Image (cartoon, rainbow, N blue to C red):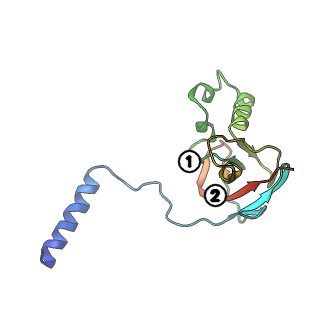
Amino acid sequence: MDRRRCVEVMIAACVALSATGCGATGLDFRSDNRLSIISPADRAEVAVPFLLQWRLRDPGDQDSAFAVLVDVSPPRAGASIIELLPPSQQDVATCDRTCQSQALLARGVTVTSADSLEVTVLPRRSGLSADRARRHTITIIVLDDQDRRVGEVAAAIDVDEVFR
């Protein structure tokens, strides 16, 4: 295929892609490294209870709280942390804020305005090898005052639970 034909095919492909409605809106292609986990270190061995500490450099106007997620994937940017709950618990008419907080805790999600959290329990997982079952991923994201995820700001570590 000659060079001109190759360029024409590439242009046609771009036009076709943009015409399908596949847009790239709302994506942040900058890496936001303002959030970091201070302790424990990534791949550290931990015994519960342990202290999880983090730092957010240069907090923005929207940055109100944090969500700490243990073995849970965070919601997309702009989504409410409540979206991690089943639909029956997302409606405040059937599950008030206290109910929602307890439901999030039961799923491994804690919302806090502090920059540290004493982790008192890690989930027990079955169907995995012993080494994999004791490894847990802890992710921290930033929330606004409506409990929606702010941008793509996140920090994550893996820890290996040791039993005393």
At a point 70% along the width and 26% down the height, the residue shown is 96
Residue at 61% of width from left, 30% of height from top?
A: 90
In which quadrant will I find the N terminus?
bottom left
Amino acid under disc 1? Gly
Is 17 placed left or right of 137 in the picture? left
Percent from the top left, x then y, of residue 28?
50, 60
Identify the element where label 1 is drawn: loop
Three-letter amino acid code of the residue under disc 2? Ala
Q: Residue 154, which numbered label? A: 2
Query: Position of 156 compared to 52: left or right?
Result: left
From this view, report whether residue 24 is shown above or below residue 70: below
Provide the residue designation for mark 1: 78
Q: Quadrant of residue 83?
A: top right
Q: Which residue is drawn at 72% across and 28% down?
A: 99
Q: Residue 74: percent from the left, percent from the top?
A: 60, 48
Q: Distance of mark 2 from mark 1, alpha carbons? A: 13 Å
Please identify, in this view, whether the residue under mark 2 or under mark 1 is nearer the observer. 2
